[in-house]
Image: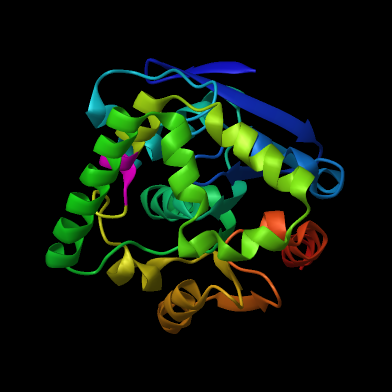
Amino acid sequence: MKIVANGIQYHVEVCGSGFPLVLLHGFTGDSSTWTPFCETLGRHSKLLMPDIIGHGRTELPDDRNRYSIEAAAQDIHSILEQLGIHQIDMLGYSMGGRLALTFANLFPERVRRLILESSSPGLATEEEREQRRMKDADLANFIFEKGIKSFVDYWEKIPLFESMKKIPLTNRENVRKQRLANSPSGLRNSLLGMGTGAQPSWWDDLEKLECKVLLLTGEKDLKFCGIAKKMLRNLKHGTWTTVENVGHAIHVEDREKFGTIVSDFLSQ
C-alpha cells in the first residue's frame, strides 16, 4: 500500500493478522527483506513492512533533512496514526534497529516489545560520530561517482557480510538483486542523513526504556556481540540471544531459527 507520511509517499507491505509488528530493514534493504516471514510470523502478528526512506519504492525527496533518523521515526508514527494503530511490537535489523530504537525513545508509549537484530544505540562520543560522518561521506561519494553496481560489489565484500558466502547461491543472488534495485541518490542520502555518525547517541537513554527488549546477534559478528553485551547492562527488561553459526544478517543466514526466536519472544 501507499501512505503519505509528512509529505512523503511511503511504500508499505502488509501481511498476517494479530497484534501489529513493524519490521524495519537494514541499509540497502527494503520491505522484501521480511516477506519470507509472512507465513511464520504472520500467524500471530500483523506485519507492517515499510520501505525506509532512501530505499525501495518509497519516495526520494531532495531535502537531505528528511532522511534524518528522527524524521524517519516521525514518519513511522504518522503511518501508524493513519492506520489507527496505537501500540506495536517493533523489530529492526542493523540500520532498521537504530531506527526502531529511535522510535522507542521518541514514542515509548507506542512500543510493547522491541527486537534489535545486529544493531546499536549509535556512537557514544562526538569524536566518534564525526569520524563516522567522514567515512559515510566518502562512501556516499563513492555511490555517486561509481554507481550502484560498483557500490554493491564493494558492499558485498566487507567483513561484516563474510558469513553470507555460506548461504545458498539463489538466496545470495536474490539479496544482490534487491540491493541493485535501490536508487543511488536514495542510498547516498540515507548514509548522510541516517548513518551511525549522523544520529543521536541513545546509550544514556537505554535505561529509560520500559518495554521488553530482545537483542539478537550472530556468534560470528563479534563487533555487534560486544555492543549487545554493553547494551544489556543498561536495559531494565533486556534479554540477549546469540545465534550459532551466523553473522550479521541472522534473518537471511538462518531464517528458521530467527523466526522461532522472534515468535517465542513475542508470545511470552
Front position in the image: 263 or 140: 140
Quadrant of residue 129 within the rendered picture:
bottom left
User: Which secondary structure is most common in the magenta stretch?
Assistant: helix
Q: Quadrant of the C terminus?
A: bottom right
Please count the marks in the image. 0
Front position in the image: 37 or 268: 37
Quadrant of residue 181 within the rendered picture:
top right
What residue appears at the point 74 percent right and 58 percent down from the top-left corner? 167
As drawn, 152 above or below 78: below
| Rendering coords of residue 15 (x, y %) | 77, 32
As drawn, 192 above or below 162: above
| Rendering coords of residue 159 (x, y %) | 48, 65
What residue appears at the point 32 percent right and 43 percent down from the top-left corner? 194
Q: Quadrant of the N terminus?
A: top right
**134 sits to left or right of 142:** left
Quadrant of residue 227 within the rendered picture:
bottom left
Within the magenta stretch, is there residue 227?
no
Look at the image and name its color scheme: rainbow
What residue appears at the point 82 percent right and 43 percent down from the top-left corner? 42
User: Residue 182, can we see it?
Assistant: yes
**215 sits to left or right of 184:** right
Front position in the image: 108 or 219: 219
As drawn, 71 above or below 227: above
What residue appears at the point 49 percent right and 63 percent down from the top-left corner? 160
| Rendering coords of residue 142 (x, y %) | 29, 38
**190 sits to left or right of 198:** right
What span is in magenta?
191-195
**151 sits to left or right of 31:** left
User: Residue 53, can we see it?
Assistant: no
| Rendering coords of residue 193 (x, y %) | 27, 39
